[in-house]
Image: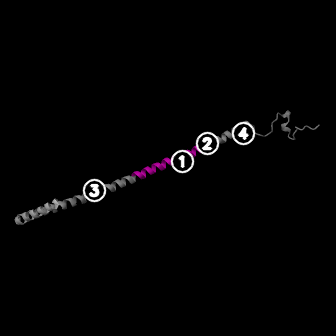
């Protein structure tokens, strides 16, 4: 009689314990998969660690460059401020000297021509009074 469940593979017969010779078991396959996943996780962890180290190195390098540029900018700004201060002090000194000279010239002119100055001051005061009245 012909058994419909019979196979040509003698390893699948009930007498042989339903095992296929030289075939890994499900547990072995799971262990292999687990081991492969563990290796992949280790690789990914190493790559992430490398990326983290590179990011830290890049950030440190960027910080160093930024700090150096800030020092350079501060130095340049300080130098320019010093130059402006020196120029302003020179200008102030020149202006002060000119003001003192003009004051001296005005005093000398008033001493030499007192009548002209008093009459001129009265005339200017009279004109200002007329303008203010309107």
Per the rendered image, the range of residues in magenta is 40-67
Residue 57 falls within the magenta-colored stretch? yes
Q: Quadrant of residue 85?
A: bottom left
In primary-sequence order, the first of circles 4 and 1 is 4
Answer yes or no: do the residues labelled 4 and 1 have beta carbons within 8 Å?
Answer: no
Q: Work out how far the residue at label 4 is from the one at label 3, CA to CA, in angstroms.
A: 78 Å
Q: Which mark is residue 82?
A: 3
In primary-sequence order, the first of circles 2 and 4 is 4
Query: Is disc 4 surrounded by few (<14), some (14 to 19) or many (20+) residues within 10 Å?
Result: few
In primary-sequence order, the first of circles 4 and 3 is 4
Residue 8 place in picture, x, y as percent: 87, 41
Residue 120 falls within the magenta-colored stretch? no
Mark 4 lies on residue: 29
Residue at the limit of the structure toward the front, as seen here: 134
Residue 76 place in picture, x, y as percent: 33, 56
In primary-sequence order, the first of circles 3 and 1 is 1
Using the rendered image of the protein, determine whether residue 27 is visible from the camera's viewpoint: yes
Q: Which mark is residue 51?
A: 1
Residue 27 place in picture, x, y as percent: 72, 36
């Amino acid at each position: 009689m012909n058994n419909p469940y019979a196979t040509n593979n003698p390893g699948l017969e009930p007498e042989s314990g339903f095992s296929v010779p030289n075939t890994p078991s499900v547990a072995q396959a799971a262990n292999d998969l687990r081991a492969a996943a563990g290796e992949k996780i280790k690789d990914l962890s190493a790559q992430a660690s490398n990326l983290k180290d590179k990011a830290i190195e890049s950030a440190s390098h960027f910080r160093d460059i930024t700090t150096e540029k800030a020092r350079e900018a501060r130095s340049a700004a300080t130098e320019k401020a010093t130059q402006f201060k020196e120029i302003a002090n020179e200008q102030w000194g020149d202006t002060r000297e000119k003001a003192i000279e003009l004051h001296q010239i005005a005093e000398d002119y008033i001493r030499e021509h007192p009548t002209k100055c008093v009459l001129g001051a009265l005339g200017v005061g009279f004109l200002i009074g007329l303008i203010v009245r309107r």
